[in-house]
Structure formats: structure tokens, C-alpha cells
Amino acid sequence: MNFKKQFKEGLLTKNPVTVQLLGMCSTLAITTSLFNGLGMGAAVTIILICSNVLISALRKVIPSQIRIAAYITIIAGFVTVVDLFLQAFIPDLAESLGVFIPLIVVNCIVLGRAEAFASKNGVLASAVDGLCQGIGYTVALTIVCVIRELLGSGTFGGGLLNGGEGIRLIPAEYPAMQMVMPVGGFLVLGFVIAGSQWLMQHLEKKNKKKEAAK
Amino acid sequence: MEAILGIIIAALLSQNFILVKFYGICPFMGVSKKIDTALGMGMAVTFVMALASAACWVVNEFLLVPLNLGYMQTVAFILVIASIVQVVEMFLKKAVPALYKALGVFLPLITTNCAVLGVVLVNVQEGYNFLISVINGAAGGLGFTLAIVLFASIRARVDKANPPECFQGFPIALITAGLLALAFMGFSGLSIF
Amino acid sequence: MANQTSRKKESTVKYVLRLTFTLLLITSVVAAALAAVNAVTEPIIKQLNEQKTQQAIETVLPGGYSETIENFDDQNGLVTKVYKGANGYAMEVRPAGFDGEIVMMVGVDFEGKVLGISVVSHTETAGLGAVAAAKTEAGNAFRGQFTGKSGEILVNKDGGDIDAITGATITSRAVCVGVSAAVACAVSLG
């Protein structure tokens, strides 16, 4: 078991959003406040862990011809459970994320990890993979959320802090509200991915220099 | 009639599935490198979306609602969509090999296209009747086609440009999509009839 | 790999049956699990929704309501429920917002003046249209403008005197349309 490696992969080098480019729909659509980002991240992480564990446990029982159908059914089951629980216990979040909760079913991250990892690895490793990928997704989502919320609404922690209003950092008349519109989603995600690519290129160069020095 | 026109215009322009509502971003980014493949994907998605809207409306109205199984919606719909995609693929392969050759590679990808599941869920949420659901599905698919073809044609040029190293590939494509979305924002006033 | 070797041993019919059976089994287990979860959550969700409606009525109609009116005249087709109390009506209206419909409760007194409005549920853009529903200063200020208004209510861009939410003219307009419909309906009820 290599928890540290899996964690680093999930967070940076194989981050589901910035590197694998999975789950774009939700990343762009709901990242307008910190509350949304953390909520969506948590929901996806829980579903990822559960479906990874179950699919990994059943990997020898499910015939390969019908595996995709079986995976989708299992994932849809977990998604519905999370959806119902959110509606019952965190209705504000359920309302704010709306149709994007049931749409986690077709979020390629969950199916992608089921196919690429859980169907080939043991239960524990799959659980860890679900957790790491989920955290990577949440972190990327949160970064996009914070930037969009700051530029678009001028606040931090909307829906969560300061009685739902968020902490105002930019006076109400200045923010560019386009940033919380679709345009902002594309632009901010573009810059965030560029940033992570730059970071990785930078790290790579550093490593090469180190090796050369040796 | 006015309502139908309103829905078509909303699905095509002011509430465009990709650029305003963010359904189906994965294929939008993945299959938009060439104009003709983008068009093929668009047509396949339109076809499946209309068909799925019809089938899921029937399933919902005659199976889920009478049996009080509203909570099974997501599971039932995704299974219906997956089967439709499978059946369409087999049918095209046998009956219209030429069309299969053109669309075949895109079909398996459509199951996980959230535009399809999205439109079906929205149809049920808004309580659309059978006709309106199918129209909404087809128009949504055409909106998808419009966006992806436009994007592919812009991207063909952007790919020849020379952005900073860290912007190469996906980031610059996203920023291009952002500018396209900005243009589509201009249609937003059309949503009120 | 194991599947491929077993496929050679089994006849095709048996194999297909096995596939069908496995898929059926998975689907039924999922369905059973969902039924169990739904049994737990359904009453809670129902209660929450009822509570929301009750709260909305209490906010917009001081003194609450004593009866629901089934027969009402609504030319716009937006009013879905009417509650009558000692001080006026609480009307549930569903105008089309920027993205999907907005479910609102509007309180109107017997003279056709707005007592207050409250948004029950919506799917507007967070930070923009969603302000109309938010329990924040900006949200309260926007909704407060409607109190005391009568007749047809418009945003100031359309010649009325309601200040639209910044960047969310369509949502603001939708709210005005909903409130106007409620007022018109209340006037017709007397």
C-alpha cells in the first residue's frame, strides 16, 4: 500500500480535474460559492469511496461484458442515496446544487475510477483511491469556487460564513458579476489548469536539476 | 405554439445546454478537435436525446409515477439511456451501416454524456408533456451541436497559435470556450417571451 | 480472463442467462436498498417541504391562514394555491425565472396591497438571481420593496419602481410578474 503516492497523485499529478480532465460539468456549473464547492466535493468523495469499495468487492463476480451497466447501476444507487439524504438533512445544499446531484451518476470521475482502478485492485486500495481522488476533486473545485466567488460576488465563504452572506472583501459595486456566470467558469478553470500545469512543469525542471547536480 | 417556439429558442440559444447550463462538457472538450467529428457527435447526441426524452417520459409516466417510485428516477433513467444507446448502436450497425460508420464511435460515449440524463431530469422536473419533452430533447441536442461545431471551428485556429507553455492544450481551449459563452450571454434576454 | 475461459465451457444460452441474472440481481439489490433509504427520508423531506410552505405563509401573511381556496380566477396561470386568513390572502405563484421556475409565496391584503413576499424554492444563479431568495441584507432589501405595492408591479428598467437585483434583471422581472399575478388574483377574489 502506498498511501502517500496515491495521495500525491490524487492531489496533483493525477488530479481528476486539472490533469485527467474528468467531471467538467459539475466543476464548471456549481462553483459559484464556497458552500457549493465543499458540498459537491464531499458528496462526490463519499460516492467515490462507496462505489469504489463495492465495485472492487464485486470485481470477480461481475462478468466483464456487462460491467459498465453494472457499475452505472451501482453508482446510480449510491447517488440516489446521497441525494435523498441531502434533501432530508441538508435541504439548503440540495437546493443549491439542484440537478447536478443526480448528474453525479454520469460524472466521469466516478465511472472512470471504477473502470480504471476499482475493477483491478483490492477493496482497501480502492477505498484509499476513492478518498484521494475525491480530495483532489474537492481541492480543485474549492480553488475555482474561491476565485469565482471573490471576483464575481466580492465575497469569501458565501452560503457558509457570516450567516450565508459570506465575508465581503470587495465592495458590492465593484465585482465583475460575469465571473459567476458561465463565462467565468470557463475562464477561471482555464487559468487554474494552466496554473497547475505550470506548477508541475516547474517541479519537473527542479527534479531534473537535482538529478543533474548529483 | 408560442410555448414550443420559446422552448426551442431557449434550448438552442439563451439556455444553450453547453454554454449556459454546462451539460455535456466532457464530449464538448473531448470531441471538438475537428469540425466533422464534432458534427457527427452532435447529430448522434441529438438523436439519442430525443429518443431518451420520449422513452424516459413513458417510463416515468406509466411506471414510476403510478408505482410511487419517484426515488428510482435516476437509476431507471440511466438504465433506459444505456439501453437506448446500445440498441441504437446495434440497429445502426445492421440497418444503416453507412450511418454507423459515421456515428458508431461516438455512441458508447453518449451514455455518460450528462446532457442526455440532464435533459431527461429537467423534463420531469418541469412537468413537460410528451410532445414538449421530445421537442426539448431534440432542441437541446441541436443546441449542443451548434455549440460544439462553433467551438471546433474556432479551435482549429487556436491550435495553430502559440500560447505560453502552461496554457497549451486544455487551458487555452477552456478560455476560448469562455469567450464563446460570453457571446451566448447576449442571447439571455430572449428567454422571456 | 476468468470470464473468457468459462465462456468456452458454457453454452451461449447459459452464458446470456447468467449475464441477465447477474444484472437483474444487482438492480434488485440497488432497488431494495433505495426503497429502504426512501422509507427513512421520505417523511422527513415531506415534513420539511410542508414546514417551508408554512413558514413562507407566516412570513407573508400576519396571523396565518384559516382556509384554502380551491376556486380562484387567475388569468396568468401562475397562481397555484390560495390560502385565506383574517388579514388577506397568501398566494403560491410560480413564475418562470432565469433558469426554471421560481416558487414564491405572496401575501396580499383585501385591498390588493402586497403584505410581503417569500421565495420557497428556485434554481437561479448563486450570487445573482439567488439573491432574491437569500436571507441576507440584500435579499431582504429586494423583497421589502414589494410591501405596500398594488396593481401591476414592474422593475425600474420597465418603468416601474422596483430596483432590480444587480446582474439579475430577468429574475427580478420574474418576481414582479409573479407578484403582479398574485395581486390581480387577490383583487378578483375581493
Image (tube, rainbow, N blue to C red):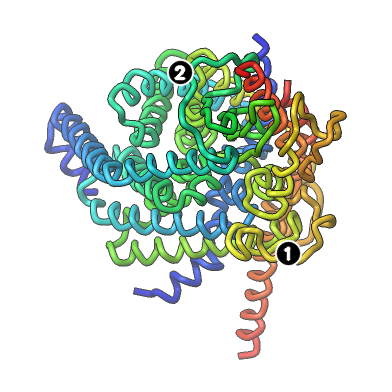
> Circle 1 marks a residue in which chain?
A
Residue displayed at 63% across by 43% down = B29
Q: Secondary structure at mark 1?
A: strand
Give the x, y percent position of residue C21. Answer: 18, 34
Q: Residues under labels 1 and 2: Cα distance?
A: 47 Å
Q: Residue at x 22, y 51 (%)?
A: A60
In this rendering, the label closer to the viewer, 1 or 2? 1
Chain letter belonging to callout 2: B
The residue positioned 55% from the left and 16% from the top of the image is C72
- Residue A35 falls in image quadrant: bottom right
Which residue occupies the extreme front position in the image? C86
User: Is residue A121 in sight in this rendering?
Assistant: yes
Q: Position of residue C57 (x, y in %)?
A: 53, 38
Residue at the bottom extreme? A214
Which one is in front, B64 or C4? Answer: B64
Q: Do discs 1 and 2 belong to a common subunit?
A: no
Per the image, label 2 sits on a secondary structure element best described as helix
Side (left or right) of A91 relative to B170: left
Amino acid on which disc 2 is placed: Ala
Which mark identifies residue A168?
Answer: 1
Point out the image quarter for the N terminus of chain B.
Answer: top right
Q: Label 2 belongs to which residue?
A: B54
Q: Measuring 59% from the left and 51% from the top, which residue is drawn there?
A: A27
- The amino acid marked with disc number 1 is Arg
